[in-house]
Amino acid sequence: MRVAIQVSELRYATDDGVLVLDGLSFGLPGDGFVLVVGPPSSGKTLLLELILREREPTGGQILVLGRNMARLSQARARELRRRIGYMPEEPVVLDERSVWENLEFKLRALGIKGSEAREHAARALELARLRGKEEMRASDLDALGQRRLVLALALCPEPTVLLGDDPFRGLVVDEQDELMKLLKAVNELGVAVLATTRDPEIANRHGFPLRERAPVLRYAVHLRPEVRG
């Protein structure tokens, strides 16, 4: 079975000796969906930063699409990151630009223009259910609409893996459930999804059992609060 992300005995300690992650191991199948659940300061954002190689682990190993992130050159790491869609916890959008202009801006920054860019943008809008809102300013979208736009941006241009840093935070229950439906729909198209949340009820409501009791493709990983060194 193809594995999108493999985390093995991952360890991370801060410079002042605070142990945030200690011996974390799990795998994200190539067509799987893993939900990482943990309270504030348990290492959820840190885990994604380590996967994206924005930080270096204290110990352990992370494989992304079969490649050891720590051993890649900067150029190879950038190339691999183009296959990873990322939804940051704090949305990064151009508030005064339209939904369509936001997507165009990202694709242009990646060197994708013309008909190819239009195809990628149209597909992302469809998956994020933003059809009909292409001309709306990003700042005029409601909370769920903003999150849909962040998802659409992450889906340009058609990633193999999608990472979401607490995308449910700040949404009411109905909006959380709608966003989860979108993420599951993306996953069902063959994109591996790894999302984090501080709310264990989201995992319970949407059928993410503990890893030990789960089917291979969809389960929850629970992080503990940071350990003081």
Image (tube, rainbow, N blue to C red):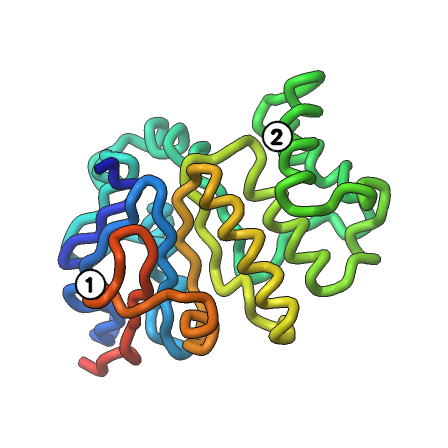
Q: Which of these two is toward me, 204 or 50?
A: 204
Q: Which residue is mark 2?
A: 109
Residue extending farthest to the top is 115
Q: CA distance from mark 1 to mark 2?
A: 35 Å
Which corner quadrant of the image does residue 116 belong to? top right
Estimate the x, y position of residue 105 in percent, counting from the top left: 69, 34
Estimate the x, y position of residue 229 in percent, counting from the top left: 18, 80
Q: Is residue 101 left or right of residue 29?
A: right
> Which residue is drawn at the image coordinates 22% and 67% (left, top)?
213
- Work out whether 19 lies above or below 191: below
- Work out whether 36 lies above or below 83: below
> Which residue is drawn at the image coordinates 35% and 48% (left, top)?
32
Q: Is residue 152 left or right of residue 131?
A: left
Please, what is the three-letter code of the amino acid marked with disc 2? Ala
Which corner quadrant of the image does residue 171 belong to? bottom right
Q: Quadrant of the N terminus?
A: top left
Estimate the x, y position of residue 49 in percent, counting from the top left: 38, 54
Q: Which mark is residue 210?
A: none
